[in-house]
Structures are given as structure tokens and as C-alpha cells.
Image (cartoon, rainbow, N blue to C red):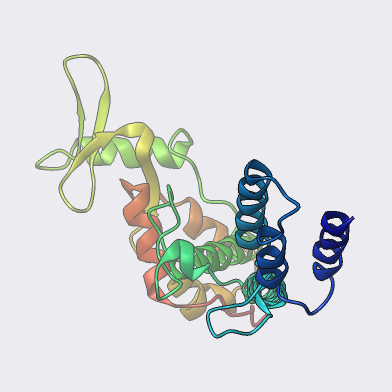
Amino acid sequence: LQFANLGMKMGMNFLGDMAFDEVASELLSSDLIPQNMQFAASMMATIISGGSGKGKGRDGNNDGFASGNNGRRDDDRRDEDEKRKKNEQEEDRKKNGQVDPQKSGSDGNKKPEGTGETAEEIAEKAAKKQKAKKAKKLREQYLGRTPGKKSRTGREVIERMKNEIPPKIRTTRSGKTEFMDSEGEWHDLSEADMAHLTDAVSWWNSTGRHYGAKSKEVREWMLNSDNYVLDHYSLNRSAGAKLGENYLPPTK
């Protein structure tokens, strides 16, 4: 009966304020428990006391179990706060078009993997492309389409460049036709643009606009082979972008 009462005290102590080591001490000192049961009870007391955090702490207070639970709750709250904060920061970065600093470096502008360009460079490139597209639309609206290499105008340009000294059009041993670009490099003819000797936007703004969009005079200038030379497409298109001129509206 005494052993049962002590067992109940141990169970109640799990929820109460009585220190577990006091109950264990009372149980172990009981004459009613054989020696081998005292040893088992001692082992059980050690396991429960250590595993549950119940009993006196290092400072002598009976708050080991409560402080352990409170600590875990605080850790959980901190984890949730950090997670929520990271999600909010990620949403803000997406709205502002920024790169995650953890993935891109401290300045948030590291080159995205596989692109070789920073986010700023990509945006600048897209803006230039849009501007070039708009300029091409206006050029075709005001001047009409540029003749191709296979057109009558293009064939005249190729023939003229073949007869220049030194020649700027040649045929290789394998039968391929090559041209010399404005920097003196040779390329396959397929990489050539019909480039204006006087840039189209400059001529239009100073002269062509006074004749009117796609007027007879404007179309004659566009189809005149003397106004063209073959150049590599990269050089021709970058030269036009560097001018910084915009097409002005026609005056008539």
C-alpha cells in the first residue's frame, strides 16, 4: 500500500509542484521495496528525471520541465517569424524586379547563371532592342524597305565592290563568296547587311522629310546603289544605335 501511494505521488508530481527527486528519494528509502526493485526504481527515476526535464534545475528551482517547453515555443516562434520575414522580402524583390542577394551576391546584381549578363545589362539591352524596333518601323513608314543583297540594287553593290582596288568581294577556293567589312575583316556574304554610306535617319531628317514619306525622291534615294556598301550586320546595326538620332515627322 505504501509503495502504491508513493507511485501515485510520483504520477501526481508530474503535474504538480513537488520536486521529483524528493519523491524518488522517499521511494528508494522504503523498507517495503526489495533491493532489486529499489535498483529498478532508481534507474526509472534517473531516466524520467533526465528525459522530461522534470525536477530541480541547476539553480535549485522546480522549473526544468516548464522552462524546456517555453524554450521550444520561443524557438518555434522565431523560426516562423524568420520564415515570414524571408517570404515578405522575396515578394518585395519580385515586385521591384530585383535579384535575390543570397543567390546573386551582396549587391543584388550578380550575373544570373547561364546568361553572362547582369539584370541591369539585360534590361538595358531590351530597351535598346525596343528602340531599334521602333526606329525600323518609322524608317519603313517614311523611307520604305531597304533593298536586299539579291535585289537589283544589291547586285550592283556587290559588282562595284568586286571591282574596287583592292577588291572587297572575293570568291574562295571552295566557291564561297566573302566580303570585307568596315574594319577590314572577311566574312561570308550571308552575314552582310546593306549599309547606307549616309545613315538613313540623318538623310531623312535633313533632306528626305521635306519631300514627304515614301515620295518619289525618297524612294529613288533608297534604291540608288551608290548610297550603299556591304558591312557586317553587327557593325551596321550598332553604328545606327550609336547615332542617338530619332526620325522626325515629314514636313509635307
**Quick one: 96 or 209, which is closer to the camera?**
96
Q: Please provide percent x and percent y for residue 231.
A: 31, 48
Residue plotted at (56% across, 66% down): 135
Q: Residue furthest front?
A: 31
* Left or right of residue 61: residue 243: left
Q: Is residue 181 above or below residue 136?
A: above
Quadrant of res 29: bottom right
Q: Please provide percent x and percent y for residue 130.
A: 58, 64
Residue 221 seen in the current view = yes
Q: Residue furthest left?
A: 166
How many numbered marks appear? Answer: 0
**Quick one: 248 or 155, which is closer to the camera?**
248
The C terminus - image quarter: bottom right
**Quick one: 225 or 192, which is closer to the camera?**
192
Q: Please provide percent x and percent y for residue 245.
A: 46, 78
* Left or right of residue 160: residue 204: right
Residue plotted at (52% across, 77% down): 246
Residue plotted at (50% across, 67% down): 128
* Left or right of residue 240: residue 249: right
* Left or right of residue 182: residue 51: right
